[in-house]
Amino acid sequence: MKHIFVRVFIYFGLVIVAFTLLIGLLFTQFNQNNIVGTYRSQLTDLAKSVADRVGKAQMTEDTKAFSDYLSAVEDFGSSRRMDIWIISNPKAAHPLDEEFTNVVPEQMDMSDKLEEILTSAFGGKKKNYTDHDKIYDTDMMHVAAPIYDADKQVIGAVVVNGPMRMRSNTVTQYQKYMILCVGLGGLIAIFLALIFSRQLVRPILRIDEFAGEIAAGDYMGTTGIVRRDELGSLADTMDELAEQLEEAEEYRAGVEQSRRDFFSNVSHELRTPITVTKGYADTLAEGFVTDPEKRDDYLRRIQEECTTMERLVSDLLILSRMQNPDFELNTEVINLIAVAQDAMRGLRILMKEKNLSGEVTYDDEMSLIEGDYDRIRQVFVVLMQNAIKYCDSGTSINVNISRKDGEIYASVTDHGIVIPEEEWGQVFDKFYRATTHGHREGSGLGLVVAKNIVERHGGTISVTSDEESGTVFMMIFPETSIPIEELE
């Protein structure tokens, strides 16, 4: 079990248990005060009621009626285990008559507190206190109330002495129930703390586990946490971090793969021309060739191999840059027709040497795309050079550009050596040459470069080839979304 779960559980449990105990203590104290307060009010009302009746009896001098009332009050007090004392105020101008009293203070051993509340009653104030009374040998509540005559003078006092045993028993019983409730509440609190702690800590543990997975290099997973709080926000951030790290890892792997491919391709493709060049050079250097014509032929072959290596290195560098994720195109709105015409003009001399004709046809003069002019021109040059290389003398190279459904179609068609259908998907692989093309010169990278450029522009390139239609390289580009009015 994780330490954080234990800590959260302990803290959470302590808080809930402490809160439960506090509530229990508050309710216990409230109930105790309520029971004692209610009992005090009852005794006070009784003392005041008796005081009022005694005062009226003094004024009417109805001794017989009061005697019956006093007997009834004493019987009531006895049934309630209470003593009701009626005491005369010796300091009054007209003290309460002895016929209306039942206690003589001088004949009793009163405590200081009892004398204090009695004095307060003689002063016209109701007062009470609770303590362990020696006379009754139990906890008692004593309440004193003044007796007034017709002139509102205090002529005596009524003291009601009530036992607290029953109330104490009630409070004790309530405390027992409260302890039971607090104990049960504490158990429930601990159980709830366990549940809530698990609910709180579980996403934290999952985030910690997921962080470990990320640290180990596994960026494919997610936290799987869906919450609308800070933990949910943290989980979303972790998922986003993993996604960004995965993209960064793919980027790094792509860069590393490009680097490895570049060096592998360079070492593989340069080995043969370097070996051939070195062989010719060694032969010439060692003087084995004395015939001037043969020596010139060797030098021409060395020159051709150097040209091949130069073209190969150039294509490899271009391909490496194109495959680098950091490579950026200098895009602008260009007319594909103008680019194709520019590329064909640059190849007119080669076409003339092989007695080839060329034409750029189109359906719409505004065949516009967003692209890099130089790179798109390079694609047309590569396709046209291949056409010149492999088509028959006296034929034509046709470039057609058309618009359809928001796309620009550009095809380069030649009539020469047919590429077998089973090889159509392989002509864009590195260093691949169709079996029907023999060992004609070329780096085998031109179509790879062309495909990368087209795809970088969001387009596609494909090839079909047969005797009747010739070899057709078809490119499809997305048409620019910029309104023509903004370009004018």
Image (cartoon, rainbow, N blue to C red):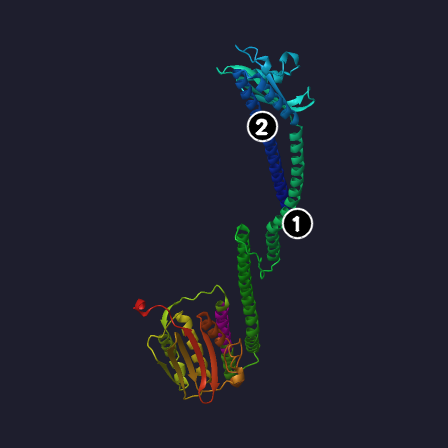
- Looking at the rendered structure, which numbered label has been put on residue 308? none
Name the quarter where the C terminus is drawn: bottom left
Residue extending farthest to the right is: 137
Residue 438 visible in the picture: no
Camera-nearest residue between 190 and 61: 61
Question: As shown in the figure, which amino acid type bears the numbered disc 1?
Answer: Lys
Camera-nearest residue between 326 and 284: 326
Is 74 situated above or below 262?
above
Comes first in the chain, label 1 or label 2? 1
Q: Helix or strand or loop: what does disc 2 sit on?
A: helix
| Tag 1–tag 2 contact (CB < 8 Å) | no
Camera-nearest residue between 330 and 350: 330
Other-residue count near label 1 (Cα within 10 Å), few / some / many at <14 / 14–19 / ≥20: few
Residue 264 visible in the picture: yes
Q: Could you tell me residue 336's position as x and y percent?
A: 37, 75
Count the numbered circles shown.
2
Of circles 1 and 2, the one toward us is 2
Horizontal side of 395 relative to 108 (left or right) equals left
Question: As shown in the figure, which amino acid type bears the numbered disc 2?
Answer: Gln
**Magenta-tinted stretch:** 304-320
- Looking at the rendered structure, which numbered label has been put on residue 2? 1
Q: Which residue is mark 2?
A: 42
